[in-house]
Image (cartoon, helix red, strand yellow):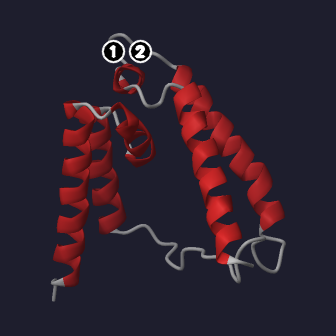
Amino acid sequence: MSPALRLLAALFAGTLFGLGLSVAQMIDPAKVINFLDFTGNWDPSLAFVMAGGLLVNALITPIILKRKHPLLGEYFRLPNKTQIDARIVIGGVIFGIGWGLAGYCPGPMLTSLSFANTDILTVVAAFAVGTLGTRWYLANQS
């Protein structure tokens, strides 16, 4: 498979993903924060977005994994680790706190860069510092 075709497929998939995030209003931090506010101004609509994604994934993934290899790759890149450990729990908690405070997770955050306001630039900078800091820490941990 040619590199140009792979890049085109990645561009299409990313564009489709970003469009879905925009249509579902997941790039609006107020919408996300209201979804997380169970005791106040709760907005359950994003649960339908997540349920739709889970449903499509649950139906299509087994069909895709029956293939010998992906359409545009040599092999499937599946996680080797299947056990839940402290790192996955702590990472999930930190992610959840950040999601609740900022109203962004990585996909919608990057999609929202098109707004280029100080709020989103601050969130992206914090994301980059947190990601790079964690990678540095894990690489230097003995």
Q: Residue at x 20, y 58 (%)?
A: 130
What residue occupies the far top of the structure in this picture? 41
Residue identifier under label 1: 39
Q: At x 25% / y 31%, what residue is drawn?
A: 117
**Between residues 74 and 87, which one lies in front from this camera angle?**
74
Could you tell me if the residues under marks 2 and 1 are in contact, i.e. CB atoms within 8 Å? yes
Q: Is residue 23 above or below residue 16?
A: above
- Give the residue number, with chain letter if any, for mark 2: 42
At x 36%, y 63%, the residue is 88
Q: Is residue 100 positioned above or below 85 on the image?
A: above
Q: Where in the figure is residue 66, as x and y percent of width and height?
A: 84, 71
Most foreground residue, 1 or 87: 1
Label 2 neighbourhood size at 10 Å, few (<14), some (14-19), many (20+)?
some
Amino acid type assigned to the residue bearing label 1 in the image: Thr
Q: Please indicate whether residue 23 sits to the left or right of residue 60 in the image.
A: left
Q: Amino acid at mark 2?
A: Trp
Q: Quadrant of residue 10?
A: bottom right
